[in-house]
Amino acid sequence: QVQLVESGGGLVQAGGSLRLSCLASGRTFSRIAMAWFRQVPGKEREFVAIISWSGLITNYADSVKGRFTISRDNAKNTVYLQMNSLKPEDTAVYYCTGGAYSSYYYPRPDESEYWGQGTQVTVSS
């Protein structure tokens, strides 16, 4: 069992940066892939980024590629999402998730076994 707690969300101006953190509890954290999804009210959850258990494989949604970086520190049971050059359209609740994903290119939210409570990111124009 893995429990996830996100932090680092907030309000930032367009062009600014935020770093989200996700602290995991549980012995299996270092053996599972981790991902970030986001959701805007009234819309489906959207894939943002994913990282393999080893950290050697990462992938990003086209909308954030080149601006966001996912990383993990298995010794600290933490996964990060560094978000740079933020845009108003990045405004959403961001969720940290973990699980056994069938693809690193199109991970689906229903493949996530573990979910954090979410953290709000608001980007003002």
Image: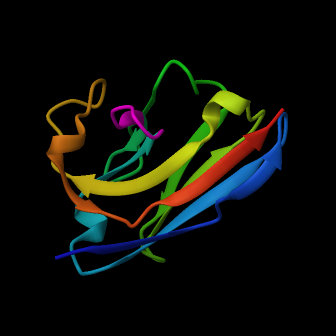
Q: State left or right for residue 91 relative to residue 12.
A: left
Residue at (67% x, 56% y) in the render: 19
Residue 7 pos. (x, y %)? 58, 69
The quarter of the picture where residue 103 lies is top left
Q: State left or right for residue 79 relative to residue 27.
A: right
Q: Is residue 79 above or below residue 17?
A: below
> In what quadrant of the picture does the C terminus appear?
top right
The quarter of the picture where residue 114 lies is bottom left
> In what quadrant of the picture does the N terminus appear?
bottom left
Q: Which residues are magenta?
A: 40-47
Residue 45 within the magenta-colored segment of the rendering? yes
Give the colour scheme shown. Answer: rainbow
The residue lying toward the viewer, choosing from 108 and 79, is 108
Q: Is residue 47 above or below residue 66?
A: below
Q: State left or right for residue 12 relative to residue 98.
A: right
Residue 75 pos. (x, y %)? 45, 76
Residue at (74% x, 35% y) in the render: 86
- Dominant secondary structure (helix, strand or loop) of the stretch shown in magenta: loop
Residue at (38% x, 34% y) in the render: 47
Residue at (14% x, 34% y) in the render: 102
Residue 32 within the magenta-colored segment of the rendering? no
Q: State left or right for residue 69 relative to residue 17.
A: left
Residue 67 pos. (x, y %)? 68, 31
The quarter of the picture where residue 87 lies is top right
